[in-house]
Amino acid sequence: MRALPITLRRFQAPDGSARGLLLNARTYEPSRVGSLYEASLRRRCGSPNTLYQSLSSAQILLSWAQDVDFDIEDRLLSGMPLDLADIEGFSRWLEAHCCAGAKTLGRSGIKTYNAYLAGAQRMTTWFVDRFHDSSQSPLPRGVVLDALQKSAKRAWKAQRIKEVSD
């Protein structure tokens, strides 16, 4: 995989906990959504490996957004999910990056691709759950969120690549 426009810096906090910081690789500016997501993950993840795996997926999603000049920070902070065209665009970008010059994805490439896709879906779901403003809807917030998440879930699932067996 080529160098990404978003970098993940791992470090140990003064309290000894594993932390991660998602930065613009050129300017070293931290990602707002990356920092919010990392803070939540740190509270929920018992394992540094789980934290870094989740942040690696966030790194990939944020790198795609920067590569295609998509303002993912505003989208996620508004609590709106990615739409089908965005998810399909991310999927194509991700597949090209996972192939790394090969014409097709091998078994390990498919697993990597699906893991990054699932991680990106979890991240976007987390932001919709926390930041979506359903106050203008006459429906209860849970109903609105459920409808948004079901639609997005179908779009993400459609992009997964089925693993082939030998």
Image (cartoon, rainbow, N blue to C red):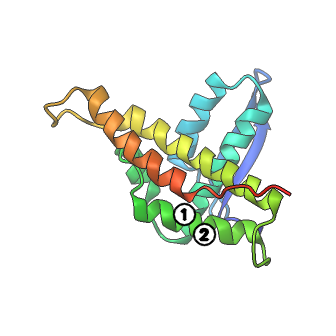
Residue at 67%, 62% in the rendered image: 25
Q: Which mark is residue 93?
A: 2
Q: Which residue is mark 1?
A: 90
Instruction: Report which quarter residue 15 is drawn in.
Output: top right
Q: Are marks 2 and 1 in contact (CB under 8 Å)?
A: yes
Total marks shown come to: 2
Residue at 54%, 63% in the rendered image: 90
Depth check, front residue: 80 or 78: 80
As shown in the figure, which amino acid type bears the numbered disc 1? Phe
Q: Secondary structure at mark 1?
A: helix
Depth check, front residue: 71 or 103: 103
As displayed, is residue 159 above or below residue 135? below
Q: Which mark is residue 60?
A: none
Quadrant where the N terminus is found in the figure: bottom right
- Local packing at callout 1 (Cα closer than 10 Å; few below 14, some 14-19, many 20+) is many
- 156 left or right, relative to 83: right
Residue at 71%, 50% in the rendered image: 8
Q: Tell me where residue 103 appears, x and y as whole percent.
A: 76, 79
Instruction: Report which quarter residue 3 is drawn in.
Output: bottom right
Q: Secondary structure at mark 2?
A: helix
Depth check, front residue: 4 or 87: 87
